[in-house]
Amino acid sequence: MSQAAPSPLATLRATAFGYAPRLLQGRGWAVAALVAVPVGISLGVFTFSRLQGLDSDPAEALRIFHDGLVKMMLPIMALVAAPAGIREDLEQRTLPLLLVRPAAVWAYPLGKGLPWFLWGAAWLVLGALGLQVVGGDPSLLLGRIGALVGAWWGELALMTLVGLLFKRGTLWGALYFFLWEPLLRIFPPFLQRLTFTHYIESLAGSRAAEVKTHELLAQEQVTTHPAVAILVLVAFGALCWALAGWKLHRTPIGLAGSEAEG
């Protein structure tokens, strides 16, 4: 007698709960350290300065947020976490073991990515709260949390999709994050809206650097309403997860592992 396939929601839940313990292994703690280390060092310096009777620099939290978390740590988190999901199963040829029972194949990328999103989001929230101690503006706290968590959702989803589309997905992702995104300030408004940095800055209410009049190539930076910015990040992430599911559904899965080679 044939066994009925579980619903997509059941597949998603079973995959997420089954994969969650992996977060407490080395890669999971590496993702956590990418947030905890820079914020922790900043808190240590802040505490030492106070004990020495020195005044703290109110701009320090702003620099850590934009130059540390947004520009460096957040992309690296996505580059580290995304390959640990469905791409790892393809390369190690373990994905067929997940499919011994009928299941909604397209739900697996989100099912394996959701624990990583929740894990990373929790540490990003803690990091944003830590920056408040260093001297963050209280009025910007919710915007910063929304910016970090929203961008993490989108960047993790994008890297999962890129990892399924390209054999060298991590390389292409790194080129996007560290070559395309830094060019924000010389992009015209339309291209600015094709970067995560634009929506992060719109949500956070602050920018990493302002355009100076002497910078000939600099373009006037535009701002998107925060409600629209978070909606764009959430919708973009959902689209990437859906496309990743579609790509996996169209990928031939077998024990030979040829689908992991191209």
Image (cartoon, helix red, strand yellow):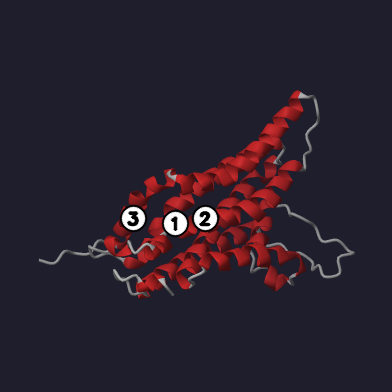
Question: In the image, what residue type sits under mark 2?
Answer: Val
User: Nearer the N terminus, badge 2 or badge 3?
Assistant: 3
Q: Give the Cα distance between marks 2 and 3.
A: 20 Å
Residue 239 seen anywhere in this rendered image of the structure = no
Secondary structure, mark 2, is helix
Question: In the image, what residue type sits under mark 1?
Answer: Ala
Residue at 34% of width from left, 57% of height from top? 12
Q: Residues within 10 Å of mark 1 (few under 14, many from 20)?
A: some
Query: Nearer the observer, disc 2 or disc 3?
Result: 2
Residue 155 seen anywhere in this rendered image of the structure = yes
Residue at 29% of width from left, 71% of height from top? 254
The residue pinned by badge 2 equals 80
Give whichever of 261, 82 is nearer the camera. 261
Quarter that holds the N terminus: bottom left
Q: Residue 15 carries which label?
A: 3
The residue pinned by badge 1 equals 84
Q: Position of residue 240 (x, y in %)?
A: 49, 67
Q: How crowded is mark 3: few (under 14 residues within 10 Å), some or many (20 or more)?
A: many
Q: Residues within 10 Å of mark 2 (few under 14, many from 20)?
A: some
